[in-house]
Image (spheres, grey):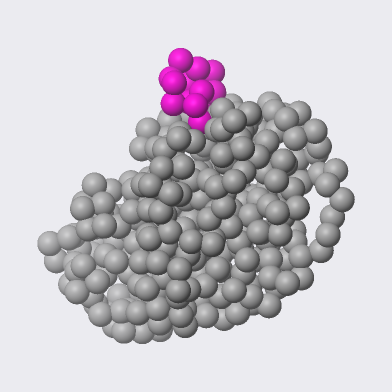
Amino acid sequence: MTIRKTLTSAAATVALLAGTTSAMAMDEVTIAYFMEWPMPFQYAKANGTFDEALGMKVNWVAFDTGTAMSAAMAAGDVHIAVSQGVPPFVVATSAGQDLQIIDVAVSYSDNDNCVVRSDLDITKDNAADLAGKKVAVPLGTAAHYGFLKQMDHFGVDLASLEIIDMAPPEGAAAIAQGSVDMACGYGGGLNRMKEHGNVLLTGAEKEELGILVFDVTSSPASFVAENPDVVAKFLKVVADSNAMWNEGSKKAEMLPVIAQDAGMDEATAEKDMSTFVFPSVEDQLSAKWLGGGAQEFMKGVAEVFVSAGSIPAALPSYDTTVNTGPLAAANGM
């Protein structure tokens, strides 16, 4: 198996940076998020609700991958990352970065997948023909985890593949140009990949195999400990935005704002969000999610990465990587 950029080296870099976060006067906060990934919080973002609720300037910085979010938090450039994939979070914490999950951002399974070039005529029925092919995968992300699980399911030997580390937009361009045979990704990148190929498994089929896909909101543990009120207020705005979207009556008002902020047309944003699930705070605090389910799932993700040689070792437990204190406080606001 040829991998042009290893997770191990990326994780080591994150671990080295983890202790370099510099103190900053809390008159502003910096939040990481994804473009082309429409979420209810962006309605509040565009309307300045976060600045008002937190009583400070909120800076927003867009990223292409969750691994880049981890590195930015390690360097002290980002205080909170919204919708970071569980796999990049697991990679970072397994390497020693002291990050914590502070909420479940979104659950999705049809918005993260692998696409095979149409001209290859490879489907789930003859997926073994992927052996020897070139694949674009954003390493250390939810897409990478799903890719590993799917290849295991189809019995495709990873050693037979040439795996190239590419963010979803790059992977979409590569499959469009015919320079890769399969590309894995999410959001707008995945939408563009589908214009040139087909998915091997639907979201429902992946879930039947135990391939869950959800993102979290994460933050350096030191930042959460030093600024619990700021974090709780931030999560309160997110929760209120999700509740407004889930209730349904204001979707027509929210959608154009969200789509514009995400850099998408309304139709595409609406299509993507129709397959997103934004759990309520009560659900997030339940055993299914942050009450134990997420921790157990992370352990499984880590073990898959260890088996694939992507990270050297998993943590004994991922219980300490979840902090429900701020979310519980937000629920009481």
156 relative to 228, above or below: below
* In this rendering, position of residue 271 left or right of residue 33: left
Residue at (76% x, 70% y) in the render: 20
Where residue 328 appears, x then y in whole percent? 56, 39
Where residue 160 appears, x then y in whole percent? 29, 83
Q: Quadrant of the C terminus?
A: top right
Residue at (81% x, 44% y) in the render: 28
Q: Camera-side residue: 321 or 332?
A: 332
**Which residue of the protein is positioned furthest toward the left in this rendering?**
125
Q: Main secondary structure of the magenta part?
A: helix
The answer to which image quadrant residue 327 occupies is: top right
134 relative to 87, above or below: below
229 relative to 164, above or below: above
Q: Is residue 134 magenta?
A: no
Where residue 233 appears, x then y in whole percent? 68, 36
Q: Is residue 245 magenta?
A: yes
Where residue 249 appears, x then y in whole percent? 46, 15
Q: Quadrant of the N terminus?
A: bottom left
The answer to which image quadrant residue 133 occupies is: bottom left
* In this rendering, position of residue 274 left or right of residue 84: left
Residue at (83% x, 47% y) in the render: 26
Whether residue 150 appears in this view of the structure is yes
> Bounds of the magenta span?
242-255
* In this rendering, position of residue 317 left or right of residue 226: left
